[in-house]
Image: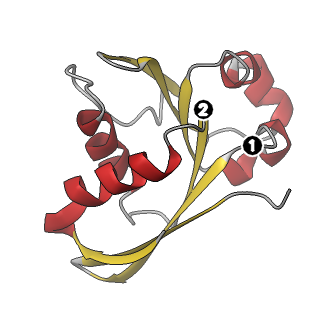
Amino acid sequence: MDAIFELSQIKSVAMATWKEGQHFRVWAFHASMGSGKTTFIHALCESIGVKEAISSPTFAIINEYQSENNGPIHHMDWYRIKNELEAIDAGVEEILLSGDICFVEWPEKAPALLPANTFHVAIEVLNEQTRRIYTFTPEA
């Protein structure tokens, strides 16, 4: 997927992204600070049936939600993680290997922990109301 969208279209773009990547269990979100990673994950969670409050796990590192159709959803924010050992100590590796859906913000903080079949989502700020989103998977 490679699309340009206005923030008012985020829910439909989240649903289209889910349709493309729903068979992946781990999603890595690449974007700069303030680009809308958490907002996009919020729209994504709503589109797949999460009913509870969805918030940034910046301080908790990991939030868990329940999806009516997809079971547990783990939303991770690795921004405050200093290295892979710290991520492992926080329980990240176990969750990534659990088979549950995992949405990871700031994956570049511990890239070696991501499974080979991670679905990558990049968000680029074009202006205050417009974003470009593109998805990719590692080469086989």
- Residue 80, horizontal then vertical, whole percent: 61, 41
Mark 1 residue element: loop
Hey, which quadrant is residue 96 in on the image?
A: top right
Q: Is residue 121 left or right of residue 112?
A: left
Q: What residue is drawn where x is 33% and y is 43%? A: 44
Res. 60 visible in picture: no
- Residue 122 against residue 128 in the figure, above or below: above
- Tag 1: residue type? Asn
Q: In this view, does 22 lie to the left or right of 66?
A: right
Q: In this view, does 60 lie to the left or right of 120?
A: left
Q: Residues within 10 Å of mark 2 (few under 14, many from 20)?
A: some
Q: What residue is drawn where x is 82% and y is 61%? A: 139
Query: For the image shown, how many numbered marks are present on the structure?
Result: 2
- Residue 7, horizontal then vertical, whole percent: 20, 68
Hey, which quadrant is residue 52 in on the image?
A: top left
Question: Which residue is more in the foreground, 73 or 54?
Answer: 73
- Residue 15, horizontal then vertical, whole percent: 30, 49
| Residue 117 numbered mark, or none | 1
Q: What residue is drawn where x is 40% and y is 48%? A: 19
Marks 1/2 in contact by CB < 8 Å: the verdict is: yes
What is the C-alpha distance between the residues marked 1 and 2? 8 Å
Q: How crowded is mark 1: few (under 14 residues within 10 Å), some or many (20 or more)?
A: some
Res. 51 visible in picture: yes
User: Could you tell me which quadrant the C terminus lies in?
Assistant: bottom right
Hey, which quadrant is residue 125 in on the image?
A: bottom left
Question: Which residue is more in the foreground, 36 or 119?
Answer: 119
- Residue 78, horizontal then vertical, whole percent: 61, 40
| Residue 41 numbered mark, or none | none
- Tag 2: residue type? Arg
| Residue 25 numbered mark, or none | 2
